[in-house]
Structure formats: C-alpha cells, structure tokens
Image: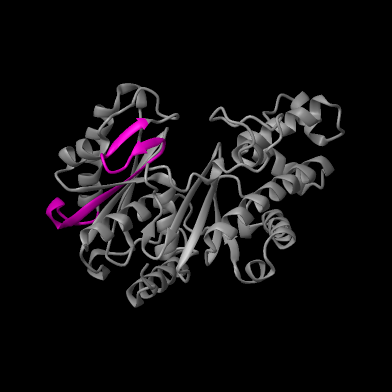
Amino acid sequence: MTKITSQRVESSRIFLRSLTMSQNNHFILLDQAQPPFFAGIDLGGTNIKVGVVDDLGRPLSWLTIPTESKKGPEDAAGRMGRAVIEATEKAGLKPADLARVGLGSPGTMDLPAGKLIRPVNIRGWDHFPIRDRVAAHCGLPVTFANDAAAAAYGEFWIGSGRDFHSLVLFTLGTGIGCGIIIGDTSIDGEHSHGAECGHIVIDCSDDARLCGCGRRGHLEAYASATAVVKRMREFIEAGRPSSLQEKLEQGRRLTPKLLAREAEQNDALSLEIIAETARWLGIGIVNLMHTIDPSGVLLGGAMTFGGNETPLGRQFLAWIKEEVARRAFPLLAERTAIDFASLGGDAGYIGAAGLARLDAKK
C-alpha cells in the first residue's frame, strides 16, 4: 500500500476550487493544465463518455457518444478510438500528447487479458478483446478496468474520498456496482471479480430474494433500484395504502424517482421503503467495514434520493448510519466516514484516466 501523496491532495484541492468557481463548468484551459495528459473512457450500455484530464485529474474536455451495442463490439471500439482523438483535439492537444488511455467497462471480464467475458448489459460482446481493439483504434496503450472500480478511483483521486487512504464505493442503480481502493490499488481480485459487493450475501434464508445474477440473498436483490421497484409493486398489490397507488392508476411508471417524490410529500409507505433500503445497505456496509476496515464508504449512482442536496437524501444517509451503528464494532462505526460520492457522471472517465496514469508512471 502507498500513502496518500501530496500531489494527490493538491490535485483534489485545485479541482475543488475550480468546481466552486465555475459550478457546472469545471473544465480548465490548456494553459492552466499540468502535463502529462490522460484520456478516460466510461463504457455504458446506452452511452459512452470520453474525457481528457491533466496530471492532477482536472478535466480539459469530454464528450458522449451512443454505445449502439447492436452494431457489435468492433464498431464500438472504433468509435471509442475516434472519440479519444476528438476529445483530445477538443482539449487543444494532439494524440501524441496523451500518455495513456483508461477504459472502464461493465460486465464480467478478464482484466489481465483485456477481454470482456459475458457483459449482461451489452449482449453479444462476449469474449471480445476490447482493450487491445480500442488501443489499435486510438493508437495508444489502454488500461482496462471494471467501471465501478474506475468510478471508485475517481472519487479516491479527486472526489469525496480525496482525504482517504482507502475506500469502498457503492454505485446504486439498476444493479449495485462496487469498487474498492486501498492506497493506489484497485482491488480487482485473482479472477477479475474483486469488489463484486453488490453480490455479498445478506439473507441466507431459503426463500431469500432472487438477484438478477440468478442467486438468492444478494445485496443487489434488496437495495438496487430494481429491487426497490419490485418492493413498491408488491406492497401496492398487497393493498398497502399509499399515494403510489393513485399514481399507478394515473398511468405513472413506478420508479425510484417517483418513490422519492411521494416520500417528500410524506407518503408513509414510500418513506418505509426508503428506510428499509437504507437498512439493507447498512448491513452490507458493515460486512465490508469488518472485512476491509476502509477509511470511508461512499454512495453514488442514480439512486441516492438527492444525496446531500435534499432533506430526503440526508435522511437516507442518516438511516444507513443508524443501521451501521447498531451492527458494526463501535470503533469502526465511530471512525469510518460514510457519505455520498461527489463526482457524479464524471467519476467513471476521470477514474479510468487516473488508473491509466498509475500504469504510465510504473
């Protein structure tokens, strides 16, 4: 393990100052940047985000392109390579100015081989050598990582975890992704399946909820957006009184966003579902605290109920902390920071670029 470097701390301070000064536009100009430069790719099932950062993690440019997964992985690899070049030129640089590219991808993978194995959200891309094909199309070496690990490193480098020596990041969405960073190391595991913490077992009963992976009792089956919507529907079908029933009758689709809106109007069932989700997450977090003893645990993704910006988000976090306090060793409950991630959708490409930076400096 390595200690937090003074350069990493300074990079986060500079980045945060730029965020404060420009709010929604936190990009820097080329004459403010510190070389070398790195590109990061955040591959998603619907869109691909590509950005260029300097040696302090400060973005100079970014762009998004559609994944268009049905066109196949080779087509996407080519477009990712061209997007790297476009983002580089948008930053006022030439491809030769880039030291390396990082690629964060979802799905099961063989990281040393640079291959996707069977990505659930990008069907038909099985066993594709994505790292080497993207490298061939952009003409630069590529570091390959799990997308949640990349996001975790982004938060560790310049985000909410910038003062941590180690962290766990949960990304709450359709499923639950997770990344673990200790020192400057992403915990990827012997078989490229490290930090699959959405699939830790929190319910050992024979009738435990079924996870999307086909196994029972996993955290994702209880605390993902998919699980939340399923519980909403079950409660309504069981006749529980709620304003959600009225919205369903109006043709509204059950989503975590609808749940949040009704909870903000003090709908009792909506608040109960969110509190229950916080409880399951608290149990999962305690398992990780007792295994890794990280400096902090961060929550990101689309389902944070507004995060620190809303009363509901802050209450969600408070419920999680209450469950952790009930179950964790007192010393860990007292000293382990639990908070929301801060980089939002930028975490993936910034973190991928950061992991590329680590490889380039070896």
Would residue 114 be counted in the magenta stretch? yes
Query: Residue 275, how many percent across, how many down?
Result: 75, 48
Is residue 215 shown left or right of residue 261? left
Q: In front: 309, or 150?
A: 150
- 62 shown above or below 324: above
Query: Residue 50, how many percent across, how many down?
Result: 32, 46
Q: In front: 60, or 174?
A: 174
Query: Residue 208, how many percent across, how many down?
Result: 69, 33
Residue sitting at x 63%, y 67%: 332
Query: Residue 95, how many percent across, how many down?
Result: 15, 51
Residue sitting at x 24%, y 28%: 74
Instruction: Work out which quarter of the rendered image holds the N terminus and state it.
Output: bottom left
Instruction: Let me know if residue 346 appears in the view.
Output: no
Instruction: Let me know if residue 218 appears in the view.
Output: yes
Is residue 132 shown left or right of residue 309? left
Instruction: Work out which quarter of the rendered image holds the C terminus and state it.
Output: bottom left
- Place residue 217 in its image quadrant: top right
Residue sitting at x 60%, y 62%: 338
Q: Please provide the residue range marked out in magenta.
A: 91-117
Is residue 101 shown left or right of residue 282? left
- Place residue 204 in its image quadrant: top right
Residue sitting at x 48%, y 69%: 164
- 309 shown above or below 42: below
Q: How is the image coloured?
A: one colour
